[in-house]
Amino acid sequence: APALALREGLAGLMRHAPQCRADAPPLGVHQSRVAIRRMRSVLKMFFPAVMPHMPPGALGGFDARLKAMATALGPARDLDVFLGGMALRLQSALPDDKRLRPLMAAARRARLDAYKPLPALLTGTEFRATIWMGFGLIEALEAVPPQDDLAGFAAQVLARRHRRLKRAGAMIEQLPPAELHALRLDAKRLRYAAELLVPLWPSHHARRYLRRLMALQEALGLANDAEVARGLVRGLRITGWTLGVAEGFALAGAAGSRDMALEAWAGWREAKRFWQDG
């Protein structure tokens, strides 16, 4: 399972990395980040089981390279989300207001700046070394003896991540934005694990659990996008009326997204834990 998941992740990264350019659609950066996150999730999930069979530092070194790559892609992704989300909604709400032009122009300039280093980063020596390191890791993983009880191991992983998410969101109504963001990351880690391991329990309970978990992650993601947009607007060096309107619009979006997250949280809490209930 881990070798196959890493192989798919590397294939996705190599497929989408060439599209991480300012003159290309946002999908390249988005899908590259998804591939990186999935690979990092697999590494963390199987680390305790496979570490004794791996070369020293192999897992940690590869993970560190993936983390650095994701960090480099982050600003471009944030600006893509802003320009394709809140900025469009704001323009739709005030279609003829010329005072929004400085905001849009500043955001587009910032996006170009964020994209400038990416082509070199994703074609250079370090990128190629990371890809080859990943394939070396896959080869080592394929030589690891299979789990004696894969279903039992998978159930432990899912139960642990489920408990972590449930505990982190116990007071979801009162969580500040930073903790709501951390909750979203916990939901994402659980989702990646569930998507990888759900074939061990092919049932309607499993499909329902995954659907509700995805809805929760999506709602938390919208809330986070609104908060990121608010911080991004502050960094664009706009002032006066434009800054106030943009921040207010972002705050309103965050409040609405939080309500959606509360509803999705209740739905996820009601879903049966398929690794226990079948």
Image: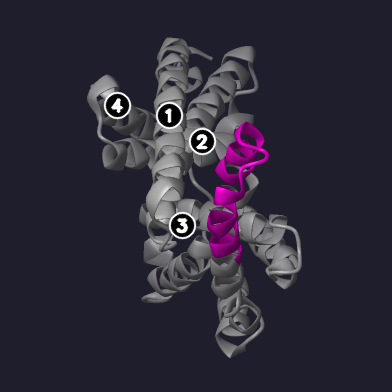
Mark pair 3, 4: CA separation: 25 Å
Mark 3, residue position = 43
The residue mark sitting in front, 2 or 3, is: 2
| Residue 89 lies within the magenta run | yes
**Lateral position of residue 216 relative to residue 235, left or right:** right
Type of amino acid under label 1: Ala
Type of amino acid under label 2: Arg
Mark 2, residue position = 191
Type of amino acid under label 4: Gly
Precedes in sequence: disc 4 or disc 1: 4
Mark 1, residue position = 252
Precedes in sequence: disc 3 or disc 1: 3
User: Is 215 in front, or is 39?
Assistant: 215
User: Is 123 in front, or is 240?
Assistant: 240
Please tell me in which quadrant of the rendered image residue 90 appears.
top right
Magenta residue span? 86-108
